[in-house]
Image: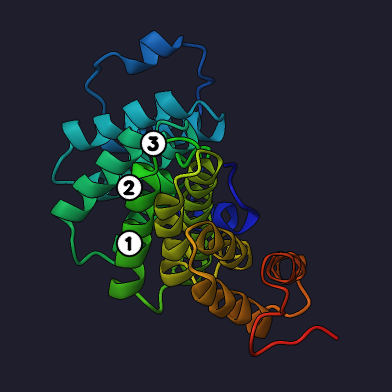
Amino acid sequence: MRLSRLRFALAASLVSALLLTGSASQAADKKSSKENNRYVARDVETLYNAAKNQLDRKRYKVAAVLFDEVERQHPYSIWARRAELMSAFSHYLAQDYPESIESARRFLSIHPGNKDAPYAMYLIAVAYYEQIGDVNRDQKISAQALDAMGDLIRRYPDSPYASDARLKIDLINDHLAGREMDIGRFYQRRHEWLASVYRFRKVVDSYQTTSHVPEALLRLTESYLELGIPEQAHRTAAVLGANFPGSDWYQRAYEIIQKTEGSAPKGKSKA
């Protein structure tokens, strides 16, 4: 997933707040990445500005190395605290998400009460979020992103990052529900009806606010009928009709019930 405009604006505002005012290094940087990365003892301002210069030039990996060098060479400087978070941010922009997470966690472990702690937690959460893949792949990362977003909201509910985290939680839940639907359909194709019921019920019970619920109710109706439980199929179709009366999913459920039972689902008649 690419950066959302909202997240990029928030990140940009943080960069403006963290980076010192003033010019970057005056000398034009003509050195290669290897030369920039090698160890050279430099005063903290020169080193930090060199890192900023690389960040401005979108050489994010080089910038991350130089910000790390600020912390290593000048660990007790106020610049070191800034550099720790900027290293995490640079790794994030370089799409090196595990390194970004590690750097942000290190910042939190050293400065748990710092005013920028909410942003460090946000970086961790969005670094997980950016790694969420296709619904057909393992969803461990999705669960980690969900946990990280939830931690941010619980600890800093009024932070400027909490609203974006809430939105992303909804998107992650929709993604996880999509995974359950995909597995449920697979079981249906194999005529493994009990297994499909388990997956579709999980969508209805655990992901009630997602866009997948109407289809899950239809699939449950189908599975219950195949299992020879028409009463449960009727009740499920009735729930679908009561909550999504104008949907195509209810139209299909109604037609299935009519075809198999000769009557509409109880509690919702078809005009």
State left or right for residue 268 relative to residue 141. Answer: right
Location of residue 251 (image quadrant)? bottom right
Q: Earlier in the sequence, mark 3 or mark 2?
A: 2
Asked if disc 2 and disc 1 are in contact, CB closer than 8 Å, the reply is yes
Circle nearer the viewer, 1 or 3: 3
Q: Report, in whole angstroms, how far the alpha carbon at label 1 lies from the one at label 3.
A: 19 Å
The amino acid on which the numbered mark 2 sits, given as a three-letter code, is Leu
Q: Helix or strand or loop: what does disc 2 sit on? A: helix
Percent position of residue 59, x then y = 50, 25
The amino acid on which the numbered mark 3 sits, given as a three-letter code, is Tyr
Which residue does the image show at 55% across and 46% down from the upper left?
A: 185
Percent position of residue 119, x then y = 37, 59
Location of residue 250 (image quadrant)? bottom right
Q: Which residue is mark 2?
A: 85
Q: Report, in whole angstroms, how far the alpha carbon at label 2 lies from the one at label 1.
A: 8 Å
Q: Which mark is residue 116?
A: 1
